[in-house]
Image: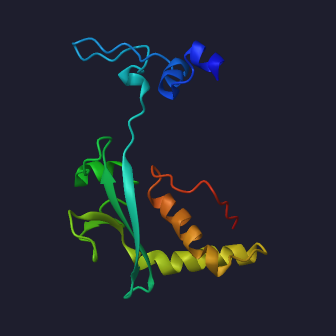
Amino acid sequence: MEEFEEAGLDDPDDALARTLPAPAAPCAASGAPSTATEPAGEEIVRTRTYNLNITYDNYYRTPRLWLQGFDESRQPLSVDQMYEDFSQDHANKTITMETHPHLAGPPQASIHPCKHADTMKKLVETAEEGGRQIPVQKYLIVFLKFMQAIIPTIEYDFTQNIQL
């Protein structure tokens, strides 16, 4: 123990301070980022994020996807900004801005469910014709992959591969 005391290692805070790296120098008063600790602005990929909600549409008897978009600063996206992220073939047709049936707030993008049942049936039939079967527990995975065709800029599933 005497060796630790002589070396100054008996104080745990002191020992910890010697093992931690020195803090980086603060940025200049101009607010410019420090090149040693932060990349330049153009090196940062700015991305939008979306909250996805799935409800059950009782009229069409299918899942219905709702999207609420946010910018890099977590501020809600405007309707026009959200339409930039959607396939132009589907914007204002299949994808519309509507009030969410269970969540308060601004309108959300919704994928209208009128064709969901027919499309999902065709996907299941295509799999069966190929000798494959889509188990019931994979239905929502297939549904989300179908939704990804309508909203190609949104990637949300890298974990499962469904072959049809």
Q: Quadrant of residue 133?
A: bottom right
Front residue of this view, candidates 24 and 36 = 24
Position of 29 compared to 8: left or right? left
Whether residue 30 is visible here, answered yes or no, is: yes
Residue 69 vs 106, above or below: the answer is above
The picture places residue 162, in percent across and down from the top left corner, at 67, 64
Residue 97 vs 35, above or below: the answer is below
Front residue of this view, candidates 122 and 158 = 158
Position of 139 compared to 37: left or right? right
What residue occupies the far right of the structure in this picture? 131
- Seen at 38% across and 36% down, the residue is 46
Q: Quadrant of residue 66?
A: bottom left
- Seen at 33% across and 48% down, the residue is 84
What residue occupies the far front of the structure in this picture? 2
Whether residue 89 is visible here, answered yes or no, is: no
Task: Give the position of the N terminus as an image quadrant.
Answer: top right
Query: What color scheme is it?
Result: rainbow
The picture places residue 152, in percent across and down from the top left corner, at 47, 52
Task: Give the position of the C terminus as an image quadrant.
Answer: bottom right
Residue 163 vs 79, above or below: the answer is below
The picture places residue 65, in percent across and down from the top left corner, at 40, 69
The picture places residue 136, in percent across and down from the top left corner, at 63, 81
Front residue of this view, candidates 29 and 107 = 29
Question: Exactly how many numbered labels are in the figure?
Answer: 0
